[in-house]
């Protein structure tokens, strides 16, 4: 089936070339980082995780969001999603690749990466994160490929794939739960030390993942002869709406607990994010933008009249995707470190090389996604013809 | 080859019967030889304990003394001085590496903010370092056991094994860990030839002077403190440190988190 | 499928490319193995912590064990078969005798194109800097 990936028009090859260019630039900056060390990033002694780990967190969510098409189809027999489950699974693969590369570029000694396996430590959450991320990637690869091949041959996918599909559902939940556990089990970081972190992660994942899927579906409809379907997109829109409501609700719970209890340790980080602290507040405009985007997206998503309009839906999805990205990809990780354990404020902002490396990583994900989607569309078009 | 066979047995044993059996197998392999097998042991002068700890008598410390203590520690361990003159102020703050340093009461004891604090204590310099916790969150977080707790209570880093993921830095509630964001060597003024430097990309922190305890010397900070810092075995009721703890009221940093810090402060 | 030829050709090309370093080394002029230069101190000692043959072949495993023992088990003294004791330290014991790192270590490592990262942290040669 891979042959579909090399049969494309000029636009397709142009897009691939753009991605390869971005990957090349990102790789160049990465070589610099390898040589100098992580000092070329905005990371510091106090904010020891930043943009890279935030991308892991965000894209784990996008990957987990793929399960929102898998579950209705396979568990609830919602037939309409049969058309797009493969899109969800392949999106998960590309997102997971972004996640893993984000971890690798974040390592100080990437050549020692396999120490995680050689000297495995079952008391470390990172160990479990590695297992579930790799497991989910593997499951999606096997499932996606077999299901697509069966569709092409006009047969039913092999029987042994079915248990893997069921297994992939808890795996999707676990990738985001375990990623939340990386943060929420740490005694000294009050911003993350909350049981609602994992549910909140999942809620934002089930909003942002399907939102990206809606956008991708609209793009696919434009650039190919395969239509993911209006009903499918509308169902996704409903899922996004519920998930976004849950996400904002959970966030409200956090605010309530922190501010009604009036415990400084819990309020400090939220204050830093939304009003700044000791005169420091680089993230303040970002966070308000994020909140505004998510609330506006919700206002557009709730009334059926706006949600049913695909152009408005697309705008809402973009707003939601960006809003959730700022929340998780910018605010959540670095704010956990500000103020630091000694209540000093040292802020963090990613540097230019750091952003370029991240763009390179995303470009690799986009390349993988493009190829997988190209193959999928090729198969779907062939089957219909 | 004897050693490679042993190595092989270790690996094969681990793979076949799981990690739990590995110590048994290597023990058998080690005792299998006749008489004059090469072996390893602790030095005769090595100081041992069940849980090393410190008591810092903050009443006996001032800025000059603390400066001397910090310098003694950082010189002994080749801790780089990434100063503002060399890299600019902003970078110096970000890339800073420190094992032990001076701070204020309200920074050291964030959960004990007295609204009306004694002026003298507010002014007094406080020394902070790794607490060598009884239940160290950094050890729990480390995915490679590069950070681990020794049987004598020291929480120590195996720099050879550290992959630089910095999970331990997120886990430490005391901000005791530093990360080598760049090659530290150009910033070491006088290299102590008896101790290695670090490489870029690994985390580092206080090692309770494990290398000095091994040859019967007290930690460098204790030596430089001229009696202001007492070290000893917290588990030994007859130790000097326990005597001091019986006589003085002491507090620990963020004890409410349950990490069991082994550094006590006399206020 | 009738792509057998293509597949086999692909596999062959892959193996040729993958094994290229070996081919290259076969035909490259390598020159004689470098000679190990011993300092007077090393000569006088006659024997290293283990016999020469063992050390030549296994010094890396020995050092690997040493670093684990010292850092992780806090045991710093190595007693060899003759009962002689050594402080397990690369910089302070090994390089105390072999204070000619360039001639003793580097030459051979260069010849074998090995770049041990020991020296990223362990200080080259206490003698020279003294």
Image: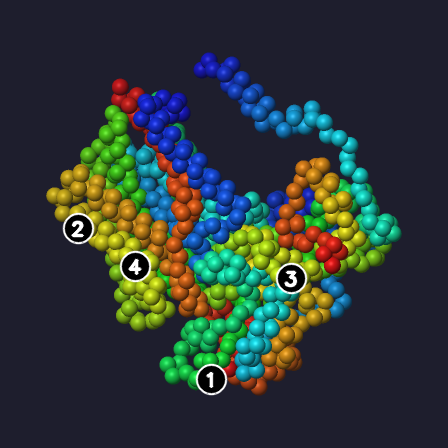
Q: Do the residues labelled 4 and 3 touch (CB within 8 Å)?
A: no
Secondary structure beneath dot 3 equals loop
Q: Residues within 10 Å of mark 4 (few under 14, many from 20)?
A: some
**Where residue B110 sits in the image (x, y, percent)?**
43, 73
Parent chain of label 4 = A
Label 3 belongs to which residue? Answer: B190
Q: Can you say whether A67 is above or below A273 in the image? A: above
Secondary structure beneath dot 1 equals helix
Label 2 belongs to which residue? Answer: A299
- Please identify, in this view, whether the residue under mark 4 or under mark 3 is nearer the observer: 3
Tell me, yes or no, whether dots 4 and 2 are on the same chain: yes
Instruction: Describe the colour scheme in one phrase.
Output: rainbow
Tell me, yes or no, whether dots 4 and 1 are on the same chain: no
Parent chain of label 3 = B
Residue found 61% across the figure and 83% down from its top? B243
Tell me, yes or no, whether dots 1 and 2 are on the same chain: no
The one of B134 and B201 positioned closer to us in this rendering = B201
Task: Give the spatial CA distance, label 3 vs label 1.
Answer: 36 Å
Parent chain of label 1 = B
Asked whether residue A120 is in view, the answer is no
Task: Give the spatial CA distance, label 4 vs label 3.
Answer: 43 Å
Label 1 belongs to which residue? Answer: B120
Q: Residues within 10 Å of mark 1 (few under 14, many from 20)?
A: few
Task: Give the spatial CA distance, label 3 vs label 2.
Answer: 63 Å
Tell me, yes or no, whether dots 3 and 2 are on the same chain: no
Secondary structure beneath dot 4 equals helix
Q: In this view, does A186 lie to the left or right of A287?
A: right
């Amino acid at each position: 089936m891979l042959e579909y990936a090399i049969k494309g028009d000029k636009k397709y090859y142009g897009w691939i070339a753009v991605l390869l260019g971005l990957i090349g630039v990102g790789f160049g900056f990465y070589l610099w980082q390898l040589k100098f060390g992580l000092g070329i990033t905005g990371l510091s002694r106090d904010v020891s995780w930043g943009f890279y780990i935030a991308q892991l967190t965000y894209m784990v969510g996008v990957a987990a969001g793929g399960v929102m098409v898998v579950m209705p189809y396979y568990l609830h027999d919602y037939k309409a999603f049969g058309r797009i489950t493969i899109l969800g699974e392949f999106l998960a693969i590309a997102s997971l690749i972004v996640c893993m590369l984000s971890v690798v570029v974040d390592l100080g000694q990437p050549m020692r990466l396999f120490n995680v396996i050689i000297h495995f430590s079952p008391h470390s959450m990172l160990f479990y994160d590695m297992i579930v991320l790799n497991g989910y990637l593997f499951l999606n690869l096997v499932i996606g490929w077999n299901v697509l091949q069966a569709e092409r041959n006009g047969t039913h996918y092999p029987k042994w794939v079915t248990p893997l599909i069921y297994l992939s559902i808890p795996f999707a939940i676990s990738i985001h739960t375990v990623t939340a556990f990386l943060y929420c089990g740490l005694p000294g970081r009050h911003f993350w030390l909350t049981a609602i972190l994992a549910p909140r992660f999942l809620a934002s994942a089930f909003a942002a993942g399907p939102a990206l899927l809606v956008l991708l579906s609209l793009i696919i409809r434009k650039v190919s002869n395969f239509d993911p379907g209006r009903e499918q997109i509308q169902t996704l829109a409903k899922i996004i709406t519920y998930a976004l409501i849950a996400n904002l609700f959970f966030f409200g719970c956090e605010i309530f607990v922190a501010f009604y209890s009036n415990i400084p340790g819990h309020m400090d980080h939220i204050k830093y994010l939304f009003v700044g602290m000791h005169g420091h507040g680089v993230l303040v405009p970002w966070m308000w933008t994020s909140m505004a985007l998510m609330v506006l997206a919700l206002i557009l998503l709730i009334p059926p009249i706006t949600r049913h309009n695909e152009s408005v839906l697309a705008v809402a999805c973009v707003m939601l995707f960006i809003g959730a990205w700022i929340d998780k990809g910018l605010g959540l990780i670095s704010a956990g470190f500000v103020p630091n354990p000694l209540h000093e404020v040292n802020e963090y902002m990613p540097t230019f090389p750091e952003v370029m490396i991240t763009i390179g990583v995303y470009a690799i994900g986009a390349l993988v996604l493009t190829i997988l989607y190209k193959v999928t569309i090729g198969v779907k078009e062939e089957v219909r013809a | 080859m004897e050693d490679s066979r042993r190595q092989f047995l270790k690996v094969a044993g681990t793979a076949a019967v799981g990690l739990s059996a590995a110590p048994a197998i290597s023990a058998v392999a080690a005792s299998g030889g006749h008489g004059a097998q090469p072996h390893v042991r602790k030095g005769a002068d090595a100081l041992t304990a069940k849980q090393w700890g410190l008591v810092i008598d903050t009443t006996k410390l001032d800025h000059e003394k603390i400066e001397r203590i910090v310098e003694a520690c950082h010189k002994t361990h080749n801790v780089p001085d990434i100063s503002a003159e060399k890299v600019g102020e902003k970078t110096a703050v970000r890339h800073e590496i420190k094992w032990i340093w001076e701070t204020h009461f309200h920074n050291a004891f964030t959960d004990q903010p007295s609204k009306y604090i004694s002026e003298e204590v507010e002014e007094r310099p406080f020394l902070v370092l790794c607490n060598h916790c009884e239940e160290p969150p950094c050890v729990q977080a480390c995915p490679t056991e590069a950070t681990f707790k020794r049987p004598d209570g020291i929480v120590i880093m195996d720099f050879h094994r550290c992959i630089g993921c910095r999970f331990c830095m997120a886990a430490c509630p005391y901000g005791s860990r530093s990360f080598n964001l760049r090659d530290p060597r150009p910033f070491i003024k006088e290299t102590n030839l008896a101790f290695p430097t670090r490489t870029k990309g690994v985390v580092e922190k206080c090692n309770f002077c494990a290398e000095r305890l091994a040859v019967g010397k007290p930690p460098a900070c204790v030596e430089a403190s001229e009696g202001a810092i007492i070290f000893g075995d917290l588990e030994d009721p007859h130790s000097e440190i326990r005597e001091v703890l019986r006589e003085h009221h002491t507090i620990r940093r963020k004890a409410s988190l349950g990490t069991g810090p082994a550094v006590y402060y006399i206020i | 499928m009738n792509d057998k030829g293509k597949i086999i050709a692909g596999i062959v090309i892959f193996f040729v490319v993958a094994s290229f370093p070996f081919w290259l080394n076969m035909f490259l002029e390598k020159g004689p193995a470098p000679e190990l230069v011993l300092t007077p101190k090393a000569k006088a000692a006659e024997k290293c912590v283990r016999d020469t043959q063992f050390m030549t072949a296994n010094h890396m495993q020995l050092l690997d064990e040493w670093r684990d023992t010292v850092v992780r088990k806090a045991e710093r003294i190595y007693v060899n078969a003759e009962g002689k004791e050594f402080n397990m330290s690369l910089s302070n014991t090994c390089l105390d005798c072999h204070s000619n790192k360039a001639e003793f270590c580097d030459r051979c490592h260069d010849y074998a194109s090995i770049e041990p990262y020991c020296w990223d942290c362990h200080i080259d040669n206490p003698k020279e800097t003294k």
